Image (cartoon, rainbow, N blue to C red):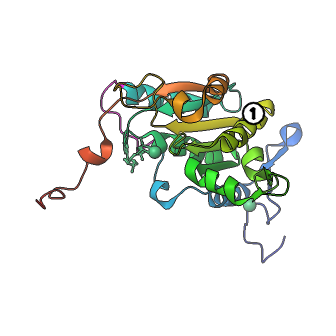
Amino acid sequence: MNQDAACPICNDSGWQIIGEGEQQRAVRCQCFLKKRTERLLQEARIPRRYQHCILKNFKTPKQDDLWVAKGKAKEFVKDYPNVDMGILFIGPCGVGKTHLAVAIIRELMEKKGMPCLFYDFRDLLLYIQDSYNPVSESSEMSVLAPVLKTEVLLLDELGARRPTEWIKETIDHILNSRYNDNKITIITSNFLDKPKEKDQYSLAQRIGNRLRSRLYEMCRTVEMNADDYRKKFKPQGFNIIK
Ligand SMILES: Nc1ncnc2c1ncn2[C@@H]1O[C@H](COP(=O)(O)OP(=O)(O)OP(=O)(O)O)[C@@H](O)[C@H]1O
Ligand SMILES: [Mg+2]
Ligand SMILES: [Zn+2]
């Protein structure tokens, strides 16, 4: 027994023996699981603004779209890794799309030890542009390796910027590679397939028909129609400046 061991349960081996006689087996010690979760959360790039987002604090007082969406998120976490598709949360501003998507990846990291990565679509575009190599006329794929390799990718705000043809091809390549490797992608977007107003763009118009079509195979669409949560729960007196 190592007197200096930080964990008295496993003596810092990361394994704990449980059961008696023939039933005896080694399982991961709590200290190992805790450290693994901390590391995954640190590496997931979840913005600070969304660090508080978990399923438990996503409120659904009525049996509406939000209630259905939360149910789908819960089911997804419970079934993972036995799921064939990711989720595409679509809806107007402030309905909680990013909250639910972040809650899913948090639970996958905490409960299932799955490496997940958060990427804002616009940041990803910048990242791709920055890594563009004019000589080879392509992006450094090694730079994109984490985006391609992570078990679960959260792509937030898909379509928020209109991509050029070249960027469309690169995004298509990323999503296609993930699809071929059976890797799950969770997506949020403000752009509906059938916009309610004439002057609004559809998702296909923003990202191209090819990519939208690919997403039908990769993600189940979950529409969230509700009021803007940010407006509803604005602190009292926030709007008194006239
Ligand atoms: N049902 C809810 N329960 C608790 N908090 C919520 C709920 N819906 C939204 N929020 C909170 O409101 C804020 C806005 O939500 P969020 O950013 O997820 O909306 P969004 O649909 O992604 O909006 P946008 O289209 O602008 O990206 C967040 O701080 C989120 O935690
Ligand atoms: Mg959002
Ligand atoms: Zn231990």
Q: Which residue is mark 1?
A: 176
Above or below, comparing residue 231 to residue 203 in the picture? below
Instruction: Decide if residue 100 is on the left or right side of residue 148.
Output: left
The N terminus - image quarter: bottom right
Give the residue at the far right of this rendering: 22
Give the residue at the far bottom of this rendering: 4
At a point 29% along the width and 36% down the height, the residue shown is 227
Label 1, ligand 2: CB separation under 8 Å = no
Question: Which is nearer the eye, 200 or 30?
Answer: 200
Q: Quadrant of ligand 1?
A: top left
Instruction: Decide if residue 230 is on the left or right side of residue 207.
Output: left
At a point 71% along the width and 56% down the height, the residue shown is 36
Where is residue 37? Give x, y as percent.
Answer: 66, 55
At a point 35% along the width and 24% down the height, the residue shown is 196
* Kind of residue sitting beneath label 1: Asn
Question: Which is nearer the eye, 108 or 224?
Answer: 224
Is residue 92 in the magenta section? Answer: no
State how many labels appear.
1
Where is residue 203? Give x, y as percent.
Answer: 51, 30
Is residue 56 in the magenta section? Answer: yes
For label 1, the SS is helix
Which stretch appears magenta? 55-64
Quadrant housing residue 195 = top left
Quadrant housing residue 214 = top right
Question: Which is nearer the eye, 200 or 27?
Answer: 200
Where is residue 216? Give x, y as percent.
Answer: 62, 22
